[in-house]
Amino acid sequence: MANLIDIYHKLLEYLGEQGWWPAETEFEVIVGAILTQASSWTNVERAIANLKSEGLLSSEALLQVNEEKLREVIKPVGYYNAKAKKLKVFVEFLHDNYNGDLDK
C-alpha cells in the first residue's frame, strides 16, 4: 500500500507544480500559513508586503526584530499580537533546532 508521501510524489510528477500558494519562497509560505489563520488573504498579503518593505521576511530578520515592531508590521491581519508571538516562536525553533535552515 502506498503511503501519503508516495501518492504526493506521483501526483507531483504527473501534474507538476500547481502554484496554489502565491509565495516567492518556502519561508514566505510558512509565514503566510501562520498569518492566514482567521484572516482574509487580502490582509495577509498586506502584512507580507509590510514584512518585505521592512526587510523582515527572513528567519534571521524575524529573529532579531522585537515583538512590538513585528506586531506593528503585521497589524493588517487579525490577532496580530498572537501571530507575532507565533512567528517569533517559529523562527526561534528553526534557529535552535535547524540553524535557521528549512532544508535540514
Image (cartoon, grey):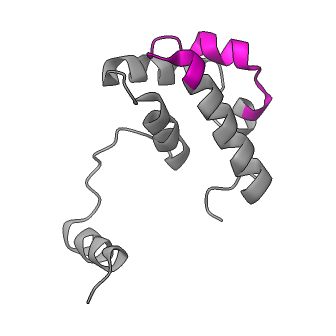
Image quadrant in which you'd find residue 18: bottom left
Q: Position of residue 44 (x, y in %)?
A: 41, 23
Q: Is residue 19 left or right of residue 27?
A: left
Asked whether 21 or 1 is in front, the reply is 1
The C terminus sits in image quarter = bottom right
**Is residue 10 shown above or below 23?**
below
Position of residue 79 measured from the top left corner of the image (x, y, whole percent): 49, 17
Pinpoint residue 65: horizontal percent, then vertical percent: 76, 23
Q: Is residue 28 visible?
A: yes
Q: For the point 42% across and 39% down, which residue is it?
A: 23
What's drawn in magenta, residue-wise? 63-82
> In percent of the image, x 74 and y 38: which residue is there?
60
The quadrant the N terminus occupies is bottom left
**Residue found at x 30% / y 71%:** 8
Q: Name the foreground residue: 46 vs 5.
A: 5
Q: At 26% across and 65% down in the image, what residue appears? A: 16
Residue 12 vs residue 84, the one in the foreground? 84
Q: Is residue 57 visible?
A: no
Q: Is residue 70 magenta?
A: yes
39 or 18: nearer the viewer: 39
Locate residue 54, reporting x and y percent.
64, 18
